[in-house]
Structure formats: C-alpha cells, structure tokens
Image (cartoon, rainbow, N blue to C red):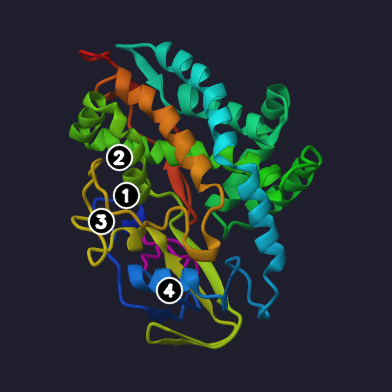
Amino acid sequence: MPTRPNDPFIPSWSQDQLDSPSPPEPDAAYFDYLLNAWVLSKYADVLAALRASSLAPSGPHQRKVVEPCDHSDRAQMRAETIEALSPRQLRTWRERITCEVHELAGGLPTEEPVDLMGDYARPLCLSLAAMVTGISREDGARLYEKARCVSAAASEPYDLALRLAAKGANAELRNYFGSGPESLRDSGFVALSQTLPCLLGNAWFSLMQNPRQWSALHQQPALTEQAIDELLRYSGLARTLTRIATEDIDLNGSFIRKGEQIILRIIAANHDPGRFSCPHQVDVTRSDGGHFTLGAGPHSCVAAGLIRMAATMITRPLVQRFGPPAPALPVEWQGGSGFRFPRSLCVCLHVSDGG
C-alpha cells in the first residue's frame, strides 16, 4: 500500500524512491479506493498493461471515459520519429557531441568539489537537445527555463500550480519548433534538456552508492553501454505511469471496467524478483534486460536508442577518467510523485591509475 504522508489522494510509495532505505517490493494487483484506481506493480501485470490496446495513457486527474480510437495517427508519428532517429543519424550526433563530452570531462576539477549535474550533465544535455531539435544553442539556452517548467509539472503531476505554469510554457515552446517529427520538437527538447540529466543523475547516484561497480566500469569502460541498461532498470526515473480503460478488460485475472484508472508502479516492476535475479543489487554486467524505464509494447519510448546512446557517451568518459568519487555534500532531492532526481551531485573527483 502507498504511504500517504501529506495528501491521501496522491500516491506516494516511499520505497520506490531511489534514496529509500527499503527497496521497492511488487504487490499483487489491487484496487485502491482512496486513489480510485487499480495499482499494478508485478512485472507480468505491468507488461500486460503496457501491451494492452484497451488501456490508454491518461493523466492523474482524468476521469472522462476514453473511447477506443484509431491508432493510425500515433503509428504514423512513431514511424516518422524512427526514420528521423536512424542509426546513421545517431552516429552523426554521437560524432558531433563526442568532442564536447571529452573536453568537458577532461576539464572537470579534481580534489575539490564539483557538481556533476550543473557542471557536466546539464550543459551537455542542453547542447544535445539543441542539436537534435535543430535550434541554435543560444535559443536552447533561452528556452531552458520554459522547458524546466514543463519538466517540473511532469515530476509532480498532482500540483495544479505547476500544471498551469507548464501549460503556458508549452505554448511558448511550440513557437520555436515548427518542423520535423512532432516528438522531436518541443517535447523532444524538454526530454533531452531536462529528463535526460535527471536520468543520468539517478544513474550516477546509484554508481556512487556502489563504488565497486564504478570501479568495474573504470577498469572496463567498454562495459558502459551494458551498464547503462542496468542503471536504467535499477535507478529508473518515472515512478508511475497512469492508464485508463477504454473498455472492460481482464488483465491477468483482474477485471478492470471501462473508465477505471490504472497506476503502474514502474520502479517496483523493475525490481520484481520473479523477473530479475538479485533485483535490488546493481550489477553492471547484468545481461537480463527487459526493464520498463523506457516503456514496452506499443507505448515504448520511440527515442530509446537516442537516450541510450547519449547516456553512454556522457557517462563513459566520466567513469573512464575518474575512480569512484567521494561525496562533497549531501544529495538534495527534487521532484515528486512522478519522478525524483538529485538537484545536484557535489563530489570530489580523483584521477585513478589508468584514468
């Protein structure tokens, strides 16, 4: 059951937070009467929900029944995005960002506090966001605060003030992105400039909590791509996703009626011992993939390849050059029921032998 320290109508599974002293545990599907929603957290149940065509994405405040619809428009948008994110295009962006990544990593100070979020992750992600969406870096810098407003509302979707601010910010952002696939316009800029650094912050925090795993990557940086997938599983970002039933459905034995909402505990499913061996341990050599951090089925993240490429390119020079960093300040967490992440990661870096 969710812990409810403040508002009983806002889900808050504290064990699903990355800094929780207790690991997330999946539960059998149940209906939460305070939240007025089904709660699914076992891997098999979440997978079935993500694959179900009769469950549609919804917001936490949506109560209007959604009718089954033609998915052709969505399919066309995904096809356009996949074409724009071809392997050849990803290689081009990787080559363009590589020099900047290595230059910034090589210039990080040692033996004195440095913020891996503000001094490394965010500048690189903003540069990549401008590159991918086709705007200038100057425009990207000007639009950064608007994108931050949109991201803040996603991190706490139950906050009305944040939602209103995000609505205005979204309207302004759309004016700057008039061409290219829809998912690589304003929403792509927000995802790359805001969501990606949050994801990296969670991943690096997990590595810092597991210095032997950081050391393993330092000694074998070629494992970084594989390690990123493990860190996506373990650290995640989005804690929950919300769906609404467009028709009656029997989901692994749970009879869900048309119009009922479903909350998917993504983090808990990614830690299901029925799917992953030793799920509460970080193992950068883990090979059993299939996590839900980037979705699954028809609702999988269409930019998953771009995210994995960027996360790998930005992380590899960090673990290759430096040994496990020492925390310089306590981590301050930011976000809400949607996702949480380190506001900053202040550490002292040192160049280890072979770095």
Q: Which mark is residue 288?
A: none
Q: Which residue is mark 3?
A: 23
Q: Which mark is residue 48?
A: 4
Q: Which residue is mark 1?
A: 234
| Residue at 37% over, 27% down | 316
Whole-number angstrom distance, CA of label 1 to CA of label 2: 8 Å
Tell me if mark 2 has few (under 14), some (14-19) or many (20+) residues whose alpha carbon lies within 10 angstroms of its own: many
Q: Of the residues under marks 3 and 2, which one precedes in the sequence?
A: 3
Question: In which quadrant is the C terminus drawn?
Answer: top left
Single out the mark in the foreground, 2 or 4.
4
Whole-number angstrom distance, CA of label 3 to CA of label 2: 13 Å
Q: Secondary structure at mark 4?
A: helix
Q: Amino acid at mark 3?
A: Pro
Q: Of the residues under marks 2 and 4, which one precedes in the sequence?
A: 4
> Quick check: can you spot residue 193?
no
Q: Is residue 231 above or below residue 337?
A: above
Residue 317 in percent (x, y) is at 37, 22
Q: Of the residues under marks 1 and 2, which one precedes in the sequence?
A: 2
Q: Of the residues under marks 3 and 1, which one precedes in the sequence?
A: 3
